[in-house]
Structure formats: C-alpha cells, structure tokens
Image (cartoon, grey):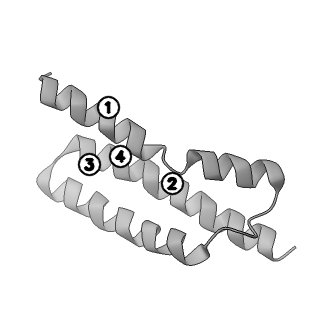
C-alpha cells in the first residue's frame, strides 16, 4: 500500500464519519427538530452517485467512504421522519 493509498483511506474514514456526531445526538435526544431533512436527502442522493462512480472506476476509497456516508445519511433521514411525527 502506497502513502497515497494510506492517506486516501484515512481521509475517507474521517469523511465517512462526518455525520456520526449528528446521528448520535439525534438518537440520544430523540429529537430531530433542528435537523434539515433536505440536507440529508441531498447528501443521500449525492452518496449514491459517488458510490456508483466509485464502482465504475473500481476505487475502494470512494466506495467505502460513500457506502458509510450513505448509511449515515439514511439513518438521519429515518430519525428525522421518526422523531418529527411523534
């Protein structure tokens, strides 16, 4: 593994968990009142596009990073819908 590969995986891991603090806060507080649903819908669609692109060029940094981001965005959309309708 090259230094560029290691940097790419490290940056991807950090990027992949960008939404984790918001997911944990929303889950803990059981409130998504101040969370923008549209932001996470846009992020979700964006992650799908990046994931497909990563598969097309066979780049595992892009694939793994955006797969995790897709899950985080999906969880936030689910939490927003769940806690907004209670």
Instruction: Describe the element under mark 3 as helix, strand or loop.
Output: helix
Q: Is residue 47 left or right of residue 53?
A: right
Callout 4–callout 3 Cβ contact below 8 Å:
yes
The residue sitting at 82% across, 53% down in the picture is 29
Looking at the picture, how far across and down is residue 21, in whole percent?
61, 45
Q: Mark 4 points at which residue?
A: 65
Q: What element carries label 1?
A: helix
The residue indicated by pointer 2 is 71
Secondary structure of residue under mark 4? helix
The residue lying at 53 percent from left, 68 percent from top is 40
Q: Is residue 10 left or right of residue 24?
A: left
Q: Name the residue under label 1.
A: 10
* Horizontal and vertical percent position of residue 85: 82, 77
Is 77 in front, or is 52? 77
User: Rounded to the nearest whole Å, what is the CA distance between mark 2 and mark 4?
Assistant: 10 Å
Image x and y of residue 18, in percent: 48, 48
Q: Is mark 2 on a helix, strand or loop?
A: helix
Around disc 1, counting alpha carbons within 10 Å, would you say few (fewer than 14), some (14 to 19), or many (20 or more)? Answer: some
Tell me the CA gap for discs 4 and 3. 5 Å
Query: Disc 2 and disc 3: Cα gap in Å?
Result: 14 Å
The residue depicted at 29 percent of the width and 49 percent of the height is 63
Residue named by callout 3: 62
* Distance from the alpha carbon under mark 1 to that under mark 3: 12 Å
Residue at position x 44%, y 67% from top? 43
Quadrant (top left/top right/bottom left/bottom right) for the N terminus: top left
Q: Which of marks 2 and 4 is nearer the N terminus?
A: 4
| Residue with the most extreme front position | 34
Q: Which quadrant: the C terminus? A: bottom right
Cβ–Cβ under 8 Å for marks 1 and 4 = no
Q: Residue 21 carries which label?
A: none
Looking at marks 1 and 4 on the same chain, the residue that comes earlier in the sequence is marked by: 1
**Residue 4 percent across, percent down from the top left:** 14, 30
């Amino acid at each position: 593994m090259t230094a560029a590969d290691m940097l790419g995986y490290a940056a991807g891991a950090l990027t992949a968990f960008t939404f984790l603090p918001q997911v944990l806060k929303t889950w803990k507080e059981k409130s998504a009142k101040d969370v923008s649903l549209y932001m996470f819908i846009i992020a979700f669609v964006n992650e799908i596009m990046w994931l497909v692109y990563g598969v097309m060029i066979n780049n595992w940094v892009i694939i793994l990073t955006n797969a995790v981001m897709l899950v985080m965005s999906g969880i936030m959309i689910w939490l927003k819908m769940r806690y907004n309708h209670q």
